[in-house]
Image (cartoon, rainbow, N blue to C red):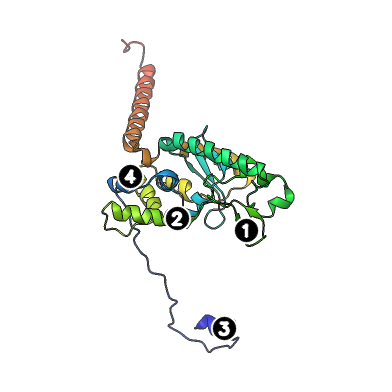
Amino acid sequence: MLFLYRDVLKISLPLIDGVERAKRPHRLPVVLSRDEVSRVLAQLSGTHLLMASLLYGAGLRLMECARLRVKDVDFELRQITVRDGKGEKDRRTLLPASIIEDLQHHLTQVKLQHEQDLRQGHGAVYLPYALDRKYPNAAREWAWQYVFQARKISVDPRTGIVRRHHASEDGLQQSVKRAVKASGLTKNASCHTLRHSFATHLLEANYDLRTIPRIAWTQRRSHNDALHARFESRRARCVESVGCDLKLAELMIEQKTRREFNAKFAACFLLIKALPDSLSC
């Protein structure tokens, strides 16, 4: 009401005390166990299985997965760069090792489809921020193609250009909904539940709390922070995806034990070195 009178109706009101603004209630997210995630993924197949595996194994949001470009998948560094995520922020996340082979095979099929589209006079994709005017040929380059493309070529309602869009997010949502029902789960799980489960399972594995937000919610960085971003990407690559069940807790315990042993050994060495020659063995 205050906003209505002040900013819309332009009516000044007398001072009103004791009025509290409405607060958004906090809701607990739905989280699946590892066994439940496996049961849901077992009900999927084809492209939807690959997309759902990225939602869980890389912590991607639904539209981040649907709009993923070929150039943002780095098999060498085993990482995915998310462009223009929530709040127009970029971040790097890990690429699950268990789906690398399937994803490479999928991209091979997508590239064959792209080459066929080029021969038919199509093959251009939508480019954001007027990049199609700055780089006229970039829309037809392989690097800018969507990882998950639509099955059919359609007319872009905004420009009237005939081209292939990214895969429909509605299709994945419906497939996951059917998979949850077929797996016998009573939880109200959706595509975003896989992302919640990704972060929760990292926490359950006692992974570094500072690393998880950088994987899932890192902001866009400036060029001056390039070195810091490279360090964080290496830290993120050290995180083996929970989708591969790679025992993060055991790895951390092993590293901590090794560091403690090295520190104790160095302290004993300095202590022995500081002893007088008469007391040395």
CA–CA distance between discs 2 and 3?
43 Å
Give, as a three-letter code, the residue at label 2.
Gly
CA–CA distance between discs 1 and 3?
40 Å
- Point out which mark residue 42 bears: 4
Compared with 123, 261 (above or below) is: above
Task: Tell which circle, 1 or 4, labels the residue nearer the N-terminal end.
Answer: 4
Q: Which residue is mark 1?
A: 156
CA–CA distance between discs 2 and 1?
19 Å
When asked about the image quadrant of residue 202, the answer is top left
- SS for dot 3: helix
Q: Nearer the viewer, mark 3 or mark 4?
A: 4
Compared with 258, 233 (above or below) is: below
- SS for dot 1: loop
- SS for dot 4: helix
Q: Which residue is mark 2?
A: 171
Compared with 231, 59 (above or below) is: below
Q: Nearer the viewer, mark 1 or mark 3?
A: 1
CB atoms at circles 2 and 1 under 8 Å apart? no
**In the rendered image, which quarter contains the C terminus?**
top left
Along the line of sight, which residue is nearer the eye, 233 or 109?
Answer: 109
Q: Which residue is mark 3?
A: 6
Compared with 105, 187 (above or below) is: below
